[in-house]
Amino acid sequence: MGVGEMWWNVFASKACQFLRALGSVMVLIVLGLVGLTYYTTVSLVYGPLAGTDTNDGRFATAVLVIYHVLILMVLWSYFACVLTEPGKVPDGWTPPQEDEEAALGKSNSEKLRRFCRKCSAWKPERCHHCSVCGRCVLKMDHHCVWVANCVGAYNYKFFLLFLLYTFVATVFDAVVLLGPFVDFFRDLEASSHGYSGGGHGGGGGGGGRDNASGGFVEVNDELNGGQQAGRGGGMAAVFVTFVLDVAFAASLLGFIIMHANLNLSNMTTIEMYEKKKTLPWRYNVGAWKNFEEVFGKNPWLWFLPYHSTDQLRRLLDISRLSGGTYPEMQSDGLDPAGEPTRAGDSPRGMPPGNTCAKCI
């Protein structure tokens, strides 16, 4: 091993340790950002107006109901992605025999017999080793510091839903905060001319809200004894929250488009960089079946961060595309001699009513 390679390995090891430690911090940052939007939207702007028998009150109540539903789905999807095992390789998994000449034209992720020297174990087709997590992950997409976890076969759906619900929530929050955001600049303009006083009325961004930001300002004035500093702090919170909402919505839109294309092509982020070596992409069996492979066949569960028992079995089965076997296959309800499940198919070798060990 050369000196350059040795130093690169040391640097890579330290970088992985840093990313591993950063994961817990990123979880706290995500929760902090959610807390900021909640404080601004609920406590400062719309909470004081909700429940009153006015148009503003009814509009504020509707905003709060929708906001809480979106935040619930964001947090549910987020923690499902954080806490779910992304794709553990079954213990004792063994690949089938493969013709060496046939393997020459395949990318690394497509080869049937691949041995991970770091894990000292065989790894299935489409499986990759994560240096941050220190293990191999089935159908690994990438390691995400925002969720402090790898994104793989079992939590990829949850990751996509987290992106989707966060995008919808940030867009919705930006829209309902547009009026108070405009009032922030009106307040600055009034201050520069030596004016003072209460609210300026709605900024027109509330869709039926005439004085939501004005109500917020009055409540804030009362809580702070009418002091200008208290009102200015509240308006600053509105400004920061609105800017963060727009920034995250813009960045998430690009990720959603990219991952939607990858999902419908049955491809991971890692495989995207290997695709040019193996055209056409052998795992692409059509957009609909590719979608069902990740989200399942039950439409009632498509938008919930949850896998049915049948979908968990299917995910376990499609992870052995190369036809490999492992000692616990029969107890998991899989037929060692049967063909593996393809995208969107029902799991093979499943006796009716049988429950696999992975699903208990």
Image (tube, grey):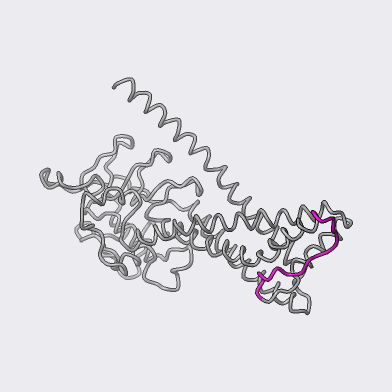
Where does the magenta region start and end? 192-207
Asked if 21 appears above or below 167 in the picture, the reply is above
Q: Residue at x 84, y 54 (%)?
A: 228
Please state, as top left, top right, bottom left or bottom right, where the N terminus lies in the image: top left
Q: In the rendered view, tell whether residue 69 sits above or below residue 195.
A: below
Q: Quadrant of residue 116?
A: top left
Q: Is residue 216 above or below residue 276?
A: below
Does the magenta-highlighted stretch encompass residue 90?
no
On screen, residue 20 versus residue 92, left or right, reads right
Q: Tell me where residue 144 appears, x and y as whole percent.
A: 46, 47
Hey, which residue is sitting farthest top in the picture? 3
The percent position of residue 261, horizontal first and vertical second, equals 35, 61
Residue 346 place in picture, x, y as percent: 30, 68
The reply, left or right, for residue 336 in relation to residue 195 is: left
* Secondary structure mostly taken by the magenta-highlighted segment of the chain: loop
**Which residue: 33% across, 63% down?**
264
Quadrant where the image shows the C terminus? bottom left
